[in-house]
Image (spheres, helix red, strand yellow):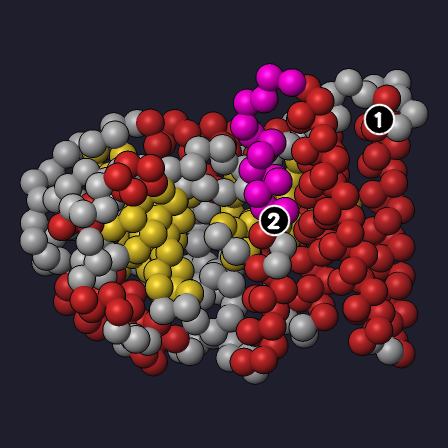
């Protein structure tokens, strides 16, 4: 929980910081394009939808391939919907317009470099724009003939690798390596390994199961040895060169469409949990509101984890079934231990004895990450390899 709160604070600082303003241009050249109009929040956009600069061009109705669509967005010929909403971010700004209009508090968000990388392993690449001065990234995702953008802070997604994995850090001791899952209208960072705490009491985990420092370091070294993503200057020449249809499947595993499609549909069905999770960061005056929402999130995660676990039990057989049953029991034992330790620290017999029950959010996170792991197992989706 501490880790996410710190990350949220960092993102908030970035969004509230001022960027140096540049003169606007009409198109992409070998110099970074700067916004030519101020972006607005969702409510403001709705009241000014007649503004010509924010109105999609006729090309927005054309059916384009993913790479053609990205290219049109980067060249400011096609609009996108961009947001800073995440499961850990109560800021919910929304920009609907052209990429060169993207700004915050009248300050343009400048992105001098970009990378093309498949973040979620579905065979279709995303475009990641690096915001200048290490102020974060804009993730562009293609979905159903449209492009959606997500803003994340620098420390939420640095050291990006060609396979889509990256590091997150809120302190020298709180570090993780993970990947992104896209879920409905937002995303979730799924840690592979992470460290928590302060010296000398740092604890290490792999998929929420405790490991020793030596094992953690081996996995961290493996991550460090992965090829870095290739960053490119944001220019029309580079966009024309890179954003071609063959980029979709170059150097990424191409999975059977039914598995990829059905898996994503399953993940999208969990979007309601993302909304419940984001609700935690909204300032509520009544503690019981916090508790009620936390319990709803926890119960939803519990239901979804057990649902996909039963599906896996029905699908697997032989040694695979035995391994699943064993690892799930080990996970359950660890979960029970973690809950018991927390209750003991607060002199409580159960969570309902506590005035503040927000710990249900953290417990729900643990179950949600297990749910994602089981979803990948069910669809034979080797997301972490």
Find numbered disc 1 in the image and state the secondary structure of the residue it sits on: helix
Residue located beneath label 1 in the image:
352
Where does the image place residue 255, in percent across and percent down from the top left?
55, 79
C-alpha distance separating marks 2 and 1: 24 Å
Q: Is residue 162 above or below residue 95?
A: below
Q: Earlier in the sequence, mark 2 or mark 1?
A: 2
Residue that appears at 67% across and 58% down? 372
Is 24 displayed left or right of 183 in the figure? left
Q: Nearer the viewer, residue 19 or 258?
A: 258
Q: Nearer the viewer, residue 22 or 288?
A: 288
Where does the image place residue 375, in percent across and percent down from the top left?
69, 64
Is 240 displayed left or right of 318 in the figure? left
Q: Is residue 351 above or below residue 205?
A: above
Q: Quadrant of the C terminus?
A: bottom right
Q: Quadrant of the N terminus?
A: top right
Residue that appears at 26% across and 39% down? 47
The magenta stretch is 272-286
Find numbered disc 2 in the image and state the secondary structure of the residue it sits on: helix
Q: Which mark is residue 234?
A: none
Residue located beneath label 2 in the image:
272
Q: Nearer the viewer, residue 284 or 249?
A: 284
Is 204 displayed left or right of 127 in the figure? right
């Amino acid at each position: 929980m501490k880790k996410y709160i710190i990350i949220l604070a960092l993102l908030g600082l970035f969004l509230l910081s001022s960027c140096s303003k540049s003169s606007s241009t009409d198109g992409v050249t070998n110099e970074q394009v700067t916004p030519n109009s101020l972006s607005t929040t969702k409510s403001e956009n709705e009241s000014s939808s007649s503004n010509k600069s924010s109105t999609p061009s006729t090309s927005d109705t054309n059916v384009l391939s993913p790479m053609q669509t990205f290219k049109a967005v980067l060249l400011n010929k096609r609009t996108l919907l961009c947001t800073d909403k995440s499961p850990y971010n109560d800021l919910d700004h929304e920009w609907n317009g052209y990429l060169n209009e993207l700004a915050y508090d009248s300050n343009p968000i400048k992105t001098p470099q970009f990378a093309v990388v498949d973040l979620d392993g579905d065979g279709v690449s995303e475009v990641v724009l690096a915001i200048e001065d290490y102020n974060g990234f804009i993730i562009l995702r293609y979905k159903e003939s449209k492009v959606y953008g997500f803003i994340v802070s620098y420390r939420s997604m640095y050291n990006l690798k060609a396979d889509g994995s990256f590091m997150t850090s809120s302190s020298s001791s709180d570090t993780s390596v993970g990947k992104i899952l896209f879920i409905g209208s937002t995303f979730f960072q799924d840690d592979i390994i992470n460290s928590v705490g302060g010296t000398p009491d740092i604890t290490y985990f792999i998929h929420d199961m405790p490991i020793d420092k030596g094992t953690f370091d081996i996995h961290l070294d493996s991550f460090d040895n992965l090829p870095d993503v290739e960053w490119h200057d944001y220019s029309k020449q580079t966009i024309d060169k890179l954003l071609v249809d063959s980029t979709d499947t170059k150097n990424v595993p191409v999975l059977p469409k039914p598995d990829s499609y059905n898996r994503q549909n399953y993940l999208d069905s969990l979007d309601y949990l993302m909304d419940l999770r984001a609700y935690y960061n909204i300032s509520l005056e009544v503690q019981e509101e916090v508790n009620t929402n936390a319990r709803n999130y926890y119960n939803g995660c519990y239901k979804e984890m057990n649902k996909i676990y039963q599906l896996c039990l029905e699908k697997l057989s032989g040694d695979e079934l035995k391994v699943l049953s064993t690892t799930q029991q080990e996970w359950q034992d660890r979960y029970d231990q973690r809950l018991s330790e927390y209750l003991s620290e607060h002199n409580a017999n159960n969570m309902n004895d506590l005035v503040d029950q927000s710990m249900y959010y953290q417990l729900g996170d643990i179950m949600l990450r297990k749910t994602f792991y089981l979803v990948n197992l069910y669809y034979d989706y080797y997301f972490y390899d």
